[in-house]
Image: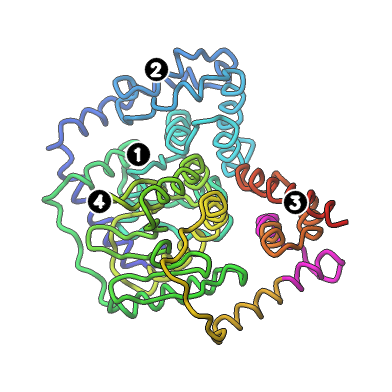
Amino acid sequence: MNDIRMYEQAIARLRKVLAHLGANQASQQSIESRDEVMRRFQPIFSIEHLPDLSQEEFHAFLLLKNNQHWSGLQRHSPKMCADMPLLRSALTALIDETQPIESRLDQAATTVHGMGKAVATAILLIVYPEKYGVWNSTSEGGLKALNLWPRFERGESLGDRYAKINQILNQLANDLQIDLWTLDVLWWDLEVSPDVPTEAPPSDELPRQEFLDQVAQAMHAELPSHLAPSAVRNRGNYLQIAYPEFRISHLHYEVYPLKSRHEVALHLESAPEINLAWLEHFQPEIAQLRQSLGYPVQAERWGHKSARVSISFPPRSLTAALAQEMGTLMARFIQATYPIMQEALAATPLPLPARRRRRVKPTDDAERRYQLLDAEVRTIRDFLDGNTASRPSDERLCYWVYLCLTFELHNEGWRLFTLIDPSQVPKTLYERTNRFAQACRIRAEVQT
């Protein structure tokens, strides 16, 4: 929120939405029901009552007819209520103001299956209506549409990201002189109010091709060396990113700033049955991908033959700041999805080419990739030998284990795995790395 002009435009637009709020009967009813909802549910989520919280009480809050504000919260009610003692404990920790909000939200989201940010932050708003706003797909879409979405550093947890978002929500509510409950209603009206004019695009908008070049530069700067792509092609309207083992006509990443939405995606464009087999590897990982990336990741069939794993969000002006944001997001998206795609390829390989091509002399790009790989292997061995000044992140150690398995450095892969702290990486990443590491261990034993 360092662009003052952008923030002032956002405030002006929200004030126009606020002025038209009375014309929307549903929104007006939601605002008027605030005190009634608070009176009913604040005692239920109080620290005194939580040890006795019943499944019926919790489920009642999730229903729109009772909370008068949020629809769809009840979808994961059976999962959240499957272990009531665990749910009570997590909610008690969530509202404990003696601890930082970052760790409390992380604990609630990771401890209770189905407890996403939308449910957790709605409860925080009920318990502390003057302090915590709601982070869900609607408020996220509104912040992005107003160019107020904060920039996140790589590796930030759900709680860390919420702390930044909540700071913006509180500042908006303060400047608009409304409470956080009413601000949450505004996001719906921002989406559905056609008579509220949008601001003119900033004068610093880039030509599309230049914008995509800057996205590519930002992505390269964020990717670790072992995930450097073999080709990045600026197609004029979109950016296509390829890896040697993908075969670009079958499988590639894309950045596509459409007029209706902006998208980063992994496109699965091989034979239909192969695409669906690959897609099955992503579907169980979607919840974890959404949590780690902080965006609504989708894994779906696409058209009659293809499939894709994608993130899309409302369109914005093609500025240098957005190029940096989308390049960073694509780098994080690749790091999160590339290991899953490797598992999918191992289970369902690419079809053989229709004809054999003659061998060609390695290109300069190929030679550069070999040099980068050699440097990464030297870094791994230096770390294992105690010749490095700093310790890499546990997430990077996971990638190194996969790298060692791929290039038959089995002993190194197993040794790296024993150094990973499972509390510092997402559960699914640790479990996947464990499978790679066990393969390394078995093969290392066979070799000896």
Res 239 visible: yes
The secondary element bearing badge 3 is classed as loop
Which residue is label 2 attached to? 60
The secondary element bearing badge 2 is classed as helix
The mark that comes first in sequence, 2 or 3, is 2
The answer to if 294 sits in the magenta stretch is no
The mark that comes first in sequence, 4 or 3, is 4
Which residue is label 4 attached to? 14
Percent of width and height locating residue 204: 30, 77
Which residue is label 1 attached to? 179
**Residue at left 39%, top 78%?**
213
Q: Are marks 4 and 1 in contact (CB under 8 Å)?
A: no
Q: Are marks 2 and 1 in contact (CB under 8 Å)?
A: no
Numbered label tally: 4
Q: Is residue 225 above or below residue 70?
A: below
The answer to if 381 sits in the magenta stretch is yes
The mark that comes first in sequence, 2 or 4, is 4
Q: CA distance from mark 4 to mark 3?
A: 47 Å
* Residue placed most toward the observer, 223 or 99: 223
Query: Magenta residues, as a range?
Result: 377-399
Q: Is residue 250 above or below residue 286?
A: below
Secondary structure mostly seen in the magenta stretch: helix
Q: CA distance from mark 4 to mark 1?
A: 14 Å
Q: CA distance from mark 2 to mark 4?
A: 31 Å
* Residue placed most toward the observer, 258 or 345: 345
Which residue is label 3 attached to? 420
Percent of width and height locating residue 238: 32, 70
The mark that comes first in sequence, 2 or 1, is 2
- Can you tell which of label 2 and label 1 is closer to the viewer? 2
